[in-house]
């Protein structure tokens, strides 16, 4: 296989929106205008084979900006016993953080026609129903809390799912545009009907720089600035949420530090606001030591973090498998891309929906970290707040 890259300006003077390029059936991974859209699948492979294929490909020209050229895009599932799922897109439109727009094609594939579209007004009739029954979810929260109180765990994340059934197919392109309007600072993604807007960076490598921005600890947003500021102060003062957050930061730090000449992190978490909730977040930035770790290896080592699994990891994952009552599939794992040089970006796969092939049903997920002071009713309310992001985007007229 051969990958050929060239500036978009070589073929058109027109600026092309990544959302329009991906359309309803393509692929998308973008945050604040930086990322890519793609169409077509030239190869589909697991993690090891995807990396090997990129390393063996002929690329022209060389010395391109990071993110330009052939990439593998896909998901790392929550279940660590399952292989990742990556695709080599046939045509990729990339917008770099330097503000450049590039095209990469595999084996001289033609550049597709792109139609600019505005969000369509939906008139679908939707119904929402529980996946895991609420009593089962509440019992799982109690079980996890008791395990923490008994000293078996430090933290476990219990999640639940809901289904949205629509009488007409959901327009994925319009959904992504609505997510951009409400969650423009999140990593918006679309991969085989798996669509979302994640505020959480698992890991990114750009040359010799490595970064992560774990989130753990949540409170709602009301839309009232005064009330939201009070809620944010309560979040920062919450012992329960601080414990939940610290477990995640320590794991990410300890996992990445052996690969770094230095790794800096904020001394105290900050409050990260998205459209419907507020999180505790801590940014970590470091410089990689030689030999540099590949971003895929870093993502596999981190995922699932204690923000989605728990700690200690194996004991928490065992409890989740026994008591949560559902298969998370892609939810709670990671979604992102990597190139042949080991650069790339992976976000935590949250605030998401998995659509069926007909796009008439979506499965949504939300969870929360359970520690000794967790209250099942409050945890249920937190999942309801988190679910509102995708529910509103799907069901909005």
Image: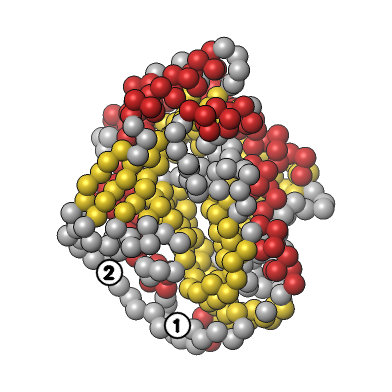
For the C terminus, the image quarter is: bottom left
Q: Where residue 210 appears, x then y in whole percent?
A: 67, 49
Front-most of residues 348 and 314: 314
Front-most of residues 144 and 178: 144
When the figure is inspected, residue 223 is found, relative to residue 98, above or below; the finding is: above
Front-most of residues 237 and 110: 110
Report if residue 48 is visible in the image.
yes
At mark 1, the secondary structure is: loop
When the figure is inspected, residue 107 is found, relative to residue 56, above or below; the finding is: below
Name the N-terminal-most of marks 2 and 1: 1
When the figure is inspected, residue 102 is found, relative to residue 272, above or below; the finding is: below
Residue at 48% from the left image edge and 28% from the top image edge: 323
Q: Where residue 335 appears, x then y in whole percent?
A: 53, 53
Query: Which numbered marker is on residue 118?
Result: 2
In the rendered view, does 185 fall on the left or right side of 291?
left
In the rendered view, does 243 fall on the left or right side of 194?
right
Front-most of residues 27 and 258: 27
Residue under label 1, please give it.
112
Residue at 39% from the left image edge and 18% from the top image edge: 375
Q: Where residue 197 appears, x then y in whole percent?
A: 42, 51
For the N terminus, the image quarter is: bottom right
At mark 2, the secondary structure is: loop
Query: Which numbered marker is on residue 291?
Result: none
Q: CA distance from mark 2 to mark 1?
A: 19 Å
């Amino acid at each position: 296989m051969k990958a050929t890259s060239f500036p978009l300006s070589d073929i058109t003077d027109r600026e092309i929106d990544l959302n329009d390029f991906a359309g309803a059936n393509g692929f998308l991974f973008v945050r604040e205008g930086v990322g890519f859209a793609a169409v077509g699948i030239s190869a589909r492979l697991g993690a090891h084979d995807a990396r090997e294929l990129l390393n063996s490909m002929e690329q022209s020209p060389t010395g391109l900006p990071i993110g330009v050229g052939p990439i593998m895009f896909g998901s790392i599932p929550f279940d660590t016993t399952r292989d990742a799922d990556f695709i080599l897109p046939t045509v990729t439109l990339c917008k770099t953080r330097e503000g450049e727009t590039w095209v990469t094609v595999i084996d001289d594939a033609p550049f597709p026609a792109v139609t600019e579209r505005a969000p369509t007004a939906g008139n679908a009739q939707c119904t929402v129903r529980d996946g895991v029954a609420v009593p089962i979810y509440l019992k799982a929260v109690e079980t996890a809390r008791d395990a923490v109180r008994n000293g078996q765990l430090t933290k476990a994340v219990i999640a639940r799912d809901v289904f949205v059934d629509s009488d007409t197919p959901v327009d994925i392109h319009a959904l992504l545009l609505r997510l951009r309007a409400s969650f423009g600072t999140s990593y918006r993604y679309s991969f085989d009907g798996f669509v979302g807007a994640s505020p959480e960076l698992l890991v990114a490598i750009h040359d010799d720089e490595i970064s992560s921005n774990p989130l753990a600890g949540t409170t709602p947003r009301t839309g009232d600035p005064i009330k939201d500021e009070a809620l944010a102060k309560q979040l920062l003062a919450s012992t329960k949420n601080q414990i939940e957050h610290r477990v995640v930061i320590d794991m990410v730090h300890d996992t990445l530090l052996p690969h770094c000449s230095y790794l800096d992190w904020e001394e105290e978490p900050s409050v990260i606001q998205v459209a419907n909730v507020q999180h505790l977040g801590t940014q970590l930035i470091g410089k990689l030591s030689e030999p540099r770790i590949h971003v895929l290896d870093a993502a596999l080592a981190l995922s699932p973090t204690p923000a989605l699994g728990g700690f200690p990891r194996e004991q928490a994952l065992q409890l989740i498998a026994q008591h949560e009552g559902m298969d998370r599939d892609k939810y709670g794992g990671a979604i992102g891309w990597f190139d042949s040089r080991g650069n790339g970006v992976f976000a935590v796969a949250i605030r998401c929906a998995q659509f069926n092939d007909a796009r008439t049903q979506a499965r949504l997920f939300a969870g929360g970290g359970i520690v000794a002071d967790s209250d099942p009713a409050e945890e249920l309310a937190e999942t309801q707040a988190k679910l509102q992001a995708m529910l509103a985007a799907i069901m909005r007229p």
